[in-house]
Each structure stands twice: as C-alpha cells, then as structure tokens.
C-alpha cells in the first residue's frame, strides 16, 4: 500500500462528527458506493435476505441493533472483494398495518359498504384513543387505499433513519410486500404449492381472534396466564345416574361436549371405558373414552372433550374421530340457534332443561354464557361446591388482548410437517444445511419443527394483504366447489379475486347461481415474507426468462433476523425453499438477541418501554450508536446503554483528532519505495508487527461472525497507537524521520479500514483527507501488506516501551508536575526481557518522557521507576508588548 493518493478534501482545522452523516450520505448516494454490480460473476456474490421492517409506526433500538450487525458484515464482505447484494424491503401488509390505520385515521373496514372515491377520513393522526365502536366503517378498497397511503409515509421516515445510520444498503433494490411485484411473487409461490398438493383448503377447527376477526397460526400463539375458576361438575352414568365428576374452567362449553376422556392406565375410570354418561342440564349422551394425553394427576383425572375448548380437544377430536358440535361463533358469542343434539336431548327427562338454558345462552359472549350455565348447574344440583379461582394458561394471538377461541371454518393451509413424520424429518434436516450463528440457535429451529402439531394456516380474514388467488364455481344453489378452485395464469399475476372476475367469467356472474365467487381471504404476512429471497432476487423474472438476477443471488448467503421469529419467518422460508427449490434458501443465518431496557425487560411497543432512535442518533452520532450495537454479540440480549454510545462517540472523535495529528507530520520524503520498505526503526517495526496481529485477529473475528471481537481488538490497539506510539514517535516524525512517518501512515490506513465497518462516517472523513475513492471500497487489510523486510520484528517492543512511558507519566503525576517536566535521572525496574526491548527504543522513550539525564536499569518482576529526579517545567511568562 503506497501513499501516492491525492486527497479529496482538506484536513479541517477542527475535525468534528457534526454534519458527517449528511455530507457522506449524499456522496454515497450520488456515487453509488454500495450499488450491487448486476454484471458480476456469481462466485463473487454475497447476497443478504434483509429483514423487511414492519412499516407500522416508528422504528426502535432493536432495529438499530440487529441491522447494524448485518451492515458490519456487508461492509466487511465488500472490502474483501465480494459483490454484495444488499436490498431493502418494507413489510407493509398484515394486522400491524391495519391496526395502525384504524387508530391513525379513525376508520375500520367493512366489505359490505360501497366504494367512495371522494372519501376523507375523520382524522389524519390523532393523539386520542378511538374505540373500535367509534371508528367509521368504510369500504374495503377505501380502507386499502388508506393503508397504502400511511405505509408510504412510514417507509419514507424509516428510509431516512436507515440512511442516517449509514447502512450500506443498495437503495436501488427496494420492494414493498404489498407492491405488485411482491404480490405477484407471493401468489405465484402459492399457486406452485397448490399445483403440487402442498397447499390445500379444509373446513377444520382453527384458532380465532375475536377482536381482529381472523384466524391465527400456531406460530403466532402466545401462552399467557388468565384468570379463571375451576368448576366441579357432575355427569351421570347412563342407566344408574351415578355421578362422574369432572373439573373444568369452561362450563359454558357443556353443550359442545362430545366425550369424557381419561388415561387408559387410570384404574378409577377403567370400568367406565366403553360406557356412556349424560351431560348435566343438557342431557346429551356421551361416550367415556381412553387417551394417553389425559392427565391422571390433573383435577379429577377425567376431562370433558368439547368442540372446541383448547388444542387438546382438537387432538382428541381428530384422533378419536369424534363428532363436531361447535357452539362458539367467530364473533366470540354463542350461536343463535339451539343445536339439533340439544333439541333432541331436550325430549328426554335428563335434558328437559337444556333447550331453555341454551336459548338463554344464545347470542351471549362466552363470559355471560358461562354465568347462565353455572346458575343452571347450581339449580340442578350438578355443581359440587362453588367455583375455585385459579390462573389458567390460555392461548392468545401475539398481538391480541383476549383469549383465542377455536372455531370451525374453511381455511387455507400449507403442509409443514405438523401432520407428516417424513416431511417433518426432511424439514429438520434442512436446518442442518444452514450455518447458524451462534450455532446453538439450530436447536431452537429443530425443537420448533419437531413440536409441530398441525399444518401452517396461511389464510387471514383481513383486508390489507396479498389476496389468495383463487375463485370457486357456484352450483345452482350458489354453493362453491372447493375441490376444484379456479386459478389464474402466472403471467396474469397479481390478481384480486374480490375485485376481478374469474377467468372465463364476467363480473355480473359473481355470486350468482352457476357463476363464481372469489376467495375473500388474504394470506398471512409470513406467507409473503417467507419468499423475500424470491421477491428481492426477481424469481419471477428468472422464471419468465427476462432476468438472470435470481441465479446470481440465490441461494442467498445470509439471512439475518431475531431469535423470536425463528419459528415464523425462518421456518416458513425454509418450508417454501424446500418445496420450490429442494434446499434451504440461504447458507448462513445470523440470529440477533433482543434489546433490553434498564430493568432487563425486552423492549417492545406493547410494553411501552421502547426508545426511538432518531433523537439518540442526533445526540450521540450514528457512529456512536453503531459502536454500541456492534458491541453486542449475535444471539445475546443486550441492554440499551447510552454509556456505551458515549464511549463510541469518544472513539470516533479520537479517530478524527489523532488522524489529523498523525497526518500533520507529512509523508516520508523522497521515493524510497513503499511505506513498508521505509520502516526501519525498532519501535516502528514493532508497532507494525503488533498491528499485523490485530489484522489477523480482526479478520478471524469476522470470518467467525464475531464482529464484537473484531471491534474489540482493533479498538484496544487503536488506543495504544494513540496514547503510546504517537507520543513516542512524534518528535522523530516532526523532525522528518522517514521510518516514523511511513509507520504512522501505514498504520493509519490499516486502522481506518479495520474500523470502517463500525464507524463508517469518521473513517470515510479521514480517508478523504489523504486518499481518493471511498474507504468502504478499499481492500480489507492483510498481514501480507504489513510484512516488513529483514529480521522479523518483535511485536512486544511497543508494549514494553509503552509500559515504561506509563510509569514516567505516573511519576510526574505523583510529583504533581506537568508532563513537560524533565527527568534528569531515573532507574527503570523491569524484567530482563522487557528491559532489553526498552533499550531498542530508548531514544524514543527519552524524547517522549523528557528523560534528559541518566537512565539506569534494574531487574524486577514488574515495570516501575525509582530514584526519579525531576526539574519541573515552568511555563514562560508572556512578554509585554511594545
């Protein structure tokens, strides 16, 4: 590495971090510094499946944390010669966006209303809370237009912050998960799944959020404690009337009961297996069955199976082939009509009261219906004692506030190994194709896959999302034929079956006998996010023969993401890659931890403890915030720490000032060859040898995905370089010594490149003072370029002389004299090896420490000074003028 470059900017009199983000952000954008070379060879590509952040409000420090990790690796790879494919997408469909739109504009979607082309929402951002009942109902398309309007605003704010943080994304490669290209890609992937039999529709029990009015997938569940009460209830053996007590927290589901179930080894209930009982109040005859999932030590040891109270009920219903007697509707209320089995039982003495009680329950919430049933149980004498308060575990949608219900409805699924052992094993094996960083995250992936108990539910009953691209023929009674869906041609994608007629039909045939109907649902957000490699890489273009980009970037090199969505985004992407390409979508998965607040709790919007990054970046600088983020290791939760940011800011400012000082000595005189060839003095050679070790360690850190280690070893050496080396050689460098000046410049050029992935603004600024081009397009330093001719230099000389200089400073400090005071006599106590190293650079130590007299040596275990004689420095008085 020579020093012949022409600087692009002058060295400022007072270097500052202020304004660097705006200055260099504009230059990078204008010059396309981080643009991907589409004409490059596949072998040189490092492609990143960048997480598309949810465009629903503001970013938080967790985004800054994880995206900085990815950016550090992207910058490193670019400097090692890789052609980095680093796109950015915005996840703008799904429930978070709809909820934000409802709150922001004060509206809610209603598919029954006509479209209003002149609609204006009642609000455009409000600080007050708007209850759902007060939100203005609007047409589906009007609602979608507001979603699109708000997400574009949010994305612009996100982009501004990402640019300021110095993320080296290729801003020419952007997508929105709701744009035409993304919708077409997502729909094409679904249609391929459907054609191969991997996607299917079925009428089945599913988890339902009554607040959001949508189905919820297993991966979106969150188990929470929920207050409840145990009710000890008596069923009655058929024929004898002998009571059989069960304990339940959901007595309102008694009319939905289909069996009593106990463990096959439970001696208490073995005599009952194969017999029947009647339900209290409703008098419905039910079988008593055995199943190994029944818990003998829980409650009474025998449980009622209802359709459906929880996921265990679903398993028993499926495995024991029990009837479906669902009574809870999508609205979270009891069905309005008395079911046939209750009416039939009502003709018997045991169920005479049942029709009356169910009629009273009809239309009520499950909570109110529970009160009706409990009162009836008290009256019949079938409630043994009073309900006992308890905390029960209930399933919630991760964004919901009420327990989920299980209702029967027609939904779309993609096979994911939850019901097929062979597919489950294959998807677990796909995890072995991926290098997880850190490696223990692989176990989280495998444990999740192994524990699946159902296929992936992908349909959602929402408005703003990617439409499920199918229609159904209607018979003469307007009943849809679900077994033979009508599908579009791939070239016609994207489509919206709710707004476009089916192929071969006209719009006036919609919902008419012999006509068609469109599937009303959209896909869940993960069904689109799971094909982000295909979206960013233009898979459709590859399939259509109009682009070769996908072949160059897929399989991708890296998927960076949080550990909490291994079960959703990562696994769903693996499922799609397995079916479409027969492999995992990427070679590496870098898993970030969470950001914790000062109380060690995860930062999240729902907890109200997030810190938004905008003000933090303004206060501390982008480089300082990046330093804090890069100090956290992959897979490890990290605390939000402004103290670390202050350390990072100090480092960046020191880099500016120390570089100005070092460059101020000037370049070596003459044309004596490369910088390395001009380095001859022992201290200079030692510093370069020590720096060579740092380069090796920092490179190993990046190669092992341990960015924090790379930063740590570089930062540690940098402070030694500033505090010791520059101080030791400044007199020699000032006097024109070629070795010192060459060493300073060689080291500075190396350190700037080592720090560039972490502090992109400060390093770019200094680089521009003495070199052309961008430091971020410079080559990553190697030990070869730091190799010095002649005998191998001793890297420990710098440390030894630095220790001695530290003792000199301490002696002056203890004597309460200034650092410019002279030492006229001193004895250096040190181990023999250390003393020998100090002698090699004694002249530099004398100059830096103002040692003007005798320097004696004595052997000791630790470096120290004794017998110090000082002449305090006295600042000359100002001479009067005139």
Image (cartoon, rainbow, N blue to C red):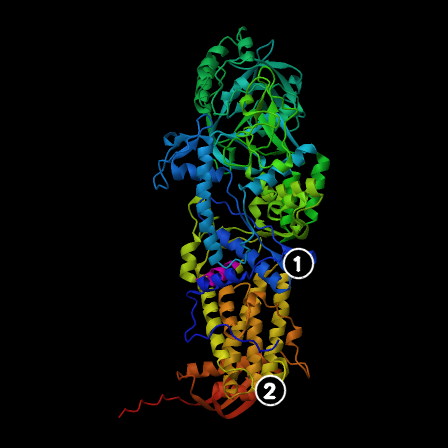
Point out the tag, 2 or 1, that comes first from the N-terminus.
Answer: 1
Residue annotated with mark 1: 40
In which quadrant of the rendered view does residue 801 lie? bottom right
Q: Read off the magenta span.
A: 621-629
Residue annotated with mark 2: 840
Q: Secondary structure at mark 2?
A: helix
Out of 229 and 142, give the one closest to the viewer: 142
Q: Is 108 on the left or on the right of 720, as rendered?
A: left
Horizontal and vertical percent position of residue 599: 44, 51
Horizontal and vertical percent position of residue 622: 46, 61
Q: Farthest right residue?
A: 422
Numbered disc in front, either 2 or 1: 1
Q: Is residue 759 visible?
A: no
In which quadrant of the rendered view does residue 775 lie? bottom right
Seen in the picture, residue 500 relative to 269 is either above or below; the reply is below
- C-alpha span from label 2 to label 1: 50 Å
Image quadrant where one finds the C terminus: bottom left
Out of 114 and 84, give the one closest to the viewer: 114
Q: Farthest left residue?
A: 882
Horizontal and vertical percent position of residue 407: 54, 25
In which quadrant of the rendered view does residue 669 lie? bottom right
Q: Is 634 on the left or on the right of 403, as rendered?
A: right
Q: Secondary structure at mark 1?
A: loop
Seen in the picture, residue 583 relative to 500 is either above or below; the reply is below
Horizontal and vertical percent position of residue 115: 44, 30
Out of 141 and 124, give the one closest to the viewer: 141
* Local crowd size for mark 1, using a 10 Å CA cut-off: few (<14), some (14–19), many (≥20): few
């Amino acid at each position: 590495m020579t020093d012949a470059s022409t600087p692009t900017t002058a060295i400022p009199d007072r270097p500052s971090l202020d304004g660097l983000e705006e200055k260099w952000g504009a230059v990078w954008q204008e010059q396309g510094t981080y643009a991907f070379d589409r004409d490059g060879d596949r072998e040189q590509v490092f492609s990143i499946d960048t997480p598309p952040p949810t465009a629903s409000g503001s970013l938080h420090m967790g985004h800054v944390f994880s995206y900085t990790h990815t950016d550090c690796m992207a910058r490193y790879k670019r400097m090692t010669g890789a052609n980095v494919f680093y796109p950015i997408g915005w996840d703008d469909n799904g429930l978070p966006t709809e909820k934000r739109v409802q709150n922001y504009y004060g509206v809610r979607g209603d598919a029954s209303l006509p479209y209003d082309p002149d609609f204006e929402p009642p609000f455009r951002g409000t600080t007050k809370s708007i209850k759902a009942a007060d939100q203005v109902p609007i047409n589906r398309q009007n609602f979608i237009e507001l979603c699109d309007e708000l997400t574009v605003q949010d994305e612009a704010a996100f982009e501004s912050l990402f640019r300021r943080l110095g993320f080296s994304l290729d801003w020419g490669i952007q997508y929105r998960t709701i744009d035409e290209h993304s919708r077409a890609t997502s729909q094409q992937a679904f249609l391929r799944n459907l054609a191969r039999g991997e996607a299917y529709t079925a009428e089945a029990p599913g988890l339902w959020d009554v607040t959001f009015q949508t189905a919820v997938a297993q991966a979106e569940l969150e188990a929470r404690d929920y207050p409840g009460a145990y009710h000890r209830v008596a069923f009655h053996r058929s024929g004898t009337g002998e009571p059989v007590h069960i304990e339940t927290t959901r007595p309102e589901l008694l009319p939905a009961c289909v069996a009593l179930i106990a463990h096959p080894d439970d001696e208490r209930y073995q005599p009952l297996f194969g017999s029947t009982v009647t339900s209290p109040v409703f008098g419905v005859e039910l079988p008593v069955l055995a199943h190994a999932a029944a818990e003998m030590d829980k409650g009474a040891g025998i449980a009622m199976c209802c359709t459906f109270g929880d996921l265990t009920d679903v398993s028993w219903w499926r495995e024991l082939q029990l009837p479906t007697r669902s009574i809870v509707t999508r609205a979270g209320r009891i069905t309005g009509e008395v079911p046939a089995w209750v009416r039939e039982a009502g003709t018997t003495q045991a169920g005479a009261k049942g029709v009356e009680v169910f009629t009273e329950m009809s239309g009520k919430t499950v909570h109110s219906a529970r009160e009706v049933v409990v009162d009836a149980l008290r009256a019949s004498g079938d409630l043994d004692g009073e309900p006992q308060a308890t905390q029960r575990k209930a399933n919630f949608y991760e964004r919901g506030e009420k327990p989920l219900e299980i209702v029967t409805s027609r939904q779309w699924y993609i096979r994911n190994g939850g019901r097929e052992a062979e597919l489950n094993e294959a998807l677990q094996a796909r995890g072995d194709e991926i290098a997880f960083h850190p490696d223990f995250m692989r176990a989280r992936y495998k444990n999740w896959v192994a524990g699946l108990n159902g296929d992936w539910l992908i349909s959602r009953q929402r408005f703003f999302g990617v439409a499920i691209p199918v229609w159904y023929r209607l018979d003469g009674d307007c009943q849809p034929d679900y077994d033979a869906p009508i599908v579009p041609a791939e070239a016609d994608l994207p489509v919206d079956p709710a707004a476009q007629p089916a192929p071969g039909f006209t719009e006036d045939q919609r919902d008419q006998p012999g006509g068609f109907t469109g599937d009303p649902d959209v896909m869940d957000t993960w069904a689109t996010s799971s094909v982000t490699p295909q979206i960013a890489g233009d898979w459709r273009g590859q399939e259509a023969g109009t682009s070769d980009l996908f072949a160059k970037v897929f399989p991708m090199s890296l998927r960076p993401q949080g550990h909490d969505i291994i079960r959703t985004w990562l696994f769903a992407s693996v499922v799609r890659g397995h079916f479409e390409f027969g492999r995992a979508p990427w070679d590496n998965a870098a898993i970030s931890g969470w950001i914790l607040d000062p109380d060690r709790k995860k930062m999240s919007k729902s907890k109200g403890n997030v810190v938004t990054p905008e003000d933090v970046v303004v206060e501390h600088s982008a480089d300082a915030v990046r330093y804090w983020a890069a100090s956290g290791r992959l897979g490890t939760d990290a605390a939000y720490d402004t103290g670390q940011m202050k350390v990072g800011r100090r480092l960046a400012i020191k880099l500016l000032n120390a570089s100005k000082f070092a460059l101020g000595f000037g370049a070596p005189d003459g044309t004596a060859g490369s910088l390395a060839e001009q380095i001859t003095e022992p201290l200079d050679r030692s510093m370069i040898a020590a720096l060579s070790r740092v380069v090796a360690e920092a490179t190993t850190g990046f190669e092992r995905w341990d960015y924090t280690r790379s930063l740590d070893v570089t930062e540690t050496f940098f402070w030694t370089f500033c505090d010791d080396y520059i101080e030791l050689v400044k007199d020699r460098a000032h006097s024109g010594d070629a070795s010192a000046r060459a060493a300073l410049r060689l080291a500075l050029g190396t350190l700037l490149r080592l720090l560039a992935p972490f502090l992109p603004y400060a390093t770019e600024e200094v680089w521009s003072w003495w070199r052309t081009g961008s430091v971020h397009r410079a080559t990553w330093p190697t030990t070869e370029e730091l190799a010095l001719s002649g005998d191998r230099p001793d890297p420990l000389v710098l440390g030894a002389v630095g220790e001695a200089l530290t003792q000199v400073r301490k002696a002056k400090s203890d004597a309460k004299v200034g650092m410019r005071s002279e030492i006229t006599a001193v004895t250096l106590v040190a181990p023999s090896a250390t003393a020998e190293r100090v002698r090699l650079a004694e002249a530099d130590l004398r100059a830096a420490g103002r040692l003007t007299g005798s320097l004696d040596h004595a052997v000791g275990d630790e470096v120290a000074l004794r017998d110090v004689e000082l002449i305090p420095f006295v600042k000359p008085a100002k001479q009067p003028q005139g």
